[in-house]
Each structure stands twice: as structure tokens, then as C-alpha cells.
Amino acid sequence: MREEYWYYSFWLIVVGSWVLGLAYGKWWGEPEEFLSQLGRSFSVPPPGRMEPWQPILYFTLTPVATFVLSQLFFGVGAAAFLFSRGVYDSSLIMGMETMLSNWKLTSSTSVEIWTIFFIILIFVVNLPLCLWAAQLGTQRAIRMLYRLRGKPLKPATGSELVSSLILIVTLSLIVGLTAAFAIAST
């Protein structure tokens, strides 16, 4: 398969496995099952369980953990771990749905507003960065498989992987600081 097609197939695997995990967790999964617990291990927990300094670590280290875990079994780890992250994220979505269904604009507290803001940060910023890191991890894993098989590779593509990972960590750190401010404000 040509190298351009691998790039798009990695995105399909990464995003598709998370969406399937989200659907499974929403309609068939239970919050205390193994897959949800596995997804919790490399996801950002809800804000009610954190100290003000912890979002910086969680938001920064979850994309790094996703990058590393997605390299397991030459890219198969990305599908497995993102499926379990989708199962866990479905519980966050259901919690936010419950909170928003009971929410009244005139009687909302600042804690509810900051909690919703925090969960939105997880889904709008942390999740895409984790998906990007997983795509980079699968790309690196397939490159490693090609090296082990002795197939020729383009030498310039390895450096853009590292610079993309540094960009992901930098953006995650900025969002982690924002989330820490949100938790400190509650």
C-alpha cells in the first residue's frame, strides 16, 4: 500500500475505534466494566476528583500516554486503547447530559459552569490531541515494522513526527493550565 494511503487509514482506525467505543459505552456498556476502567487509565478524570494542580499533569500526559500505547503491537494498540477511551468518555458525556438536562440558566452555580467548561475542554482539546498522538504513534509503529522487514523508508518523515509530538505536548500544557484555573475557580 502506498504511504499516502497509510496516513488516511491510520486516521480511520484511530477515530473509528474511539467512535465505536463511544457507541458501545453509551448503549451497551456499564461504567464499572473492564473497558471503562482501562479507558480511565489514560483519560482526564472529571473535575470533581482533582486538586487544582492535577489538570496540568493529566492534560499533558494523556496525549503522551496515548502516543506510547498506540505503538503496541505495531499499531493495534491504538485501536484497542482508543476503543476503551471511547467507552470511558461515554460516561463523561452521559454525566454532562444529566447535568445539562437539570440545568437552569437562572439558578446555575459557578461550580456547574466551571465543570461544564472543564468537560468541554476534555472533548474539544484533549481528545483531538490524543487522537492526533495516537495517529502519530501508529504511523511510527508501522515505520518500525517496515524497518524490521528491511523495506526502504523516506528519511525526512521521522523528524516531523517529533516536532508534531512537541506541539501536542505544548498545546496540552496550555490547556492544562487553563483547566487548572477552572478547577481553582470553583
Image (cartoon, rainbow, N blue to C red):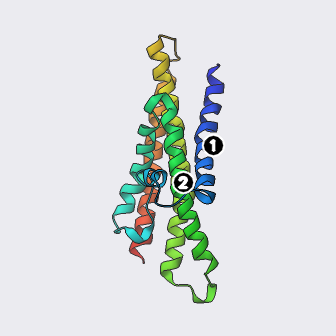
Task: Measure the C-alpha gap from mark 1 to mark 2.
Answer: 13 Å
Judge whether residue 173 can be spotted in this image: no
Q: Mark 2 points at which residue?
A: 87
In front here: 73 or 59?
A: 73
Q: Mark 1 points at which residue?
A: 16
- Residue 101 at what x, y percent from top left? 64, 77
The secondary element bearing badge 1 is classed as: helix
- Residue 15 at what x, y percent from top left? 61, 43
For the N terminus, the quadrant is top right
In front here: 34 or 180?
A: 34
The answer to which of marks 1 and 2 sits earlier in the sequence is 1
For the C terminus, the quadrant is bottom left
Residue positioned 62% across, 89% down in the render: 106
Q: What residue type is labelled 2?
A: Val
- Residue 54 at what x, y percent from top left? 35, 62
In front here: 34 or 82?
A: 34
From the image, state whether disc 1 or disc 2 is nearer to you. Answer: 2
The secondary element bearing badge 2 is classed as: helix
